[in-house]
Each structure stands twice: as C-alpha cells, then as structure tokens.
Amino acid sequence: MNRIPNYINGEPIEPRSKQWLDVVEPATAKVYTLVADSNAQDVADAVESAEKAFPEWSSTSRRDRSEILNRIAEGIDSHHERLAQAEARDTGKPISMTRNLDIPRAAENFRFFASAILHTESACHDTDGQAINYTLRKPRGVAGLISPWNLPLYLLSWKIAPAIATGNTCVVKPSEVTPMTAHFLSEILTEVGCPPGVIN
C-alpha cells in the first residue's frame, strides 16, 4: 500500500515512530493509503529545517520569491488532473468541483501572493512635524500552519503562499484525513525548485 511520508528539508522522510495512519476513501469506506503518524521529534526536525532555511529565504528578493510562487502555481496547473482526482478521492467531493474550483483556486492563491508582494507599500505619516510614523514589513520567522480537511489544497495554499511570499518559512500540518494533495504538492515543490526547508 502507498505511504505518504513527511516532507522535511525538501526530502520525503518516514515518521520517526515508524507508525502510519489509515486514510479512508469516503466513496468506498476503504483504506486506500497510509500517512505518516508524526510525533514531536518529527515536528522538531521540520522546525529545525525551517529555521535553517529562514536566513537565506528571508533575504531573497521579493522578485525571486515571486518567481518561485509563480513556478509553484504553474506546477499545480501542470498536475491539475492528478490533483483534482486525488482531492475528489480524499474528500468524497464531485470531480467537477475539484477540477473547476478547488485545484484552480490553489494555483491562483500562489499567483495572487506572487503579485501582491511586488506591489506592497508601507505607510508613512507626519505627526505634526514632531516625528514620522512609518511601517516596516519584515519576515518574522517560522510560521506554523494547520489546514482543515474540507478544502485540502485550496486552504493549504492560502496559508503557505502568504507566509513564504513575505519571506517566512513554514511547518505545515495538513489534515491526516485528506493528505494526498499535500503530498503531491511536496513533489511539485521539489520539481519547481523551491529551496529545501522553506516549506516542511
């Protein structure tokens, strides 16, 4: 049976526990794959990877980050049917919904933030000639992201895209109930050259 491992530092990694959770296909009520049953050490490994990637990623230009987000969107587009089939199987949704809404929206989430980071502005306000108030936008570090089961890739992308667009790295916990498109996304990240450790 197929197993979905963790994705840490750009590599598929088996869970330290060597334990796996069943993933049930709603249409048949049968187990069709297994997903890593991760523990605290797996999370610590993912956080360490994200922390190591942060200094370089946070100093990457907005233009270069935008290009990577666009490449991720293109990767989603190029695997559209595979992702749509996986999302329908995982969630029990009609394939027409995953083809026409869920997967296209996931790609568009990356495109939206790829564009947004190139057009941000910071406010500057004079305070009666005594001082100037201004806003600085800087990466904060490692973001912990948890996404639900009902829109697996759509909502996962809505969390990942702004985090990495703004120079943060992340550790993501997709739903163990619907993990397949997150797994396929990890393959796309490697395929399009997303730097290891930026997304775990």
Image (cartoon, rainbow, N blue to C red):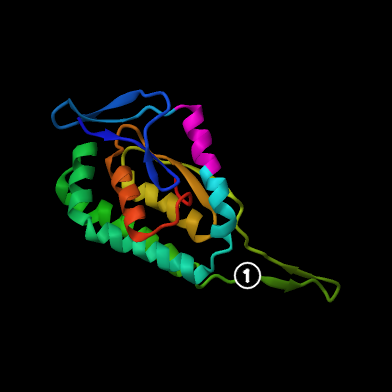
Q: In which quarter of the image is residue 11?
A: top left
State whether residue 69 is above or below residue 37.
Answer: below
Task: Give yes or no for residue 121 being in the magenta stretch.
Answer: no
- Residue at label 1? 122
Image point 60% across, 56% down: which residue? 55
Decide which of 164, 55 is in the foreground and name it: 55
Residue 129 image point, x, y percent: 84, 76
Q: Which amino acid does label 1 sit on?
A: Ser
Image quarter where the C terminus lies is top left
Image point 50% across, 67% down: which residue? 117
Q: Is residue 71 left or right of residue 125?
A: left
Residue 104 image point, x, y percent: 27, 58
Tell me which secondary structure the magenta stretch mostly adopts.
helix
Image point 49% across, 34% down: which residue? 43
What span is colored magenta in the figure?
A: 39-48
Residue 5 image point, x, y percent: 34, 36
Q: Is residue 45 in view?
A: yes
Q: Number of marks in the image?
A: 1
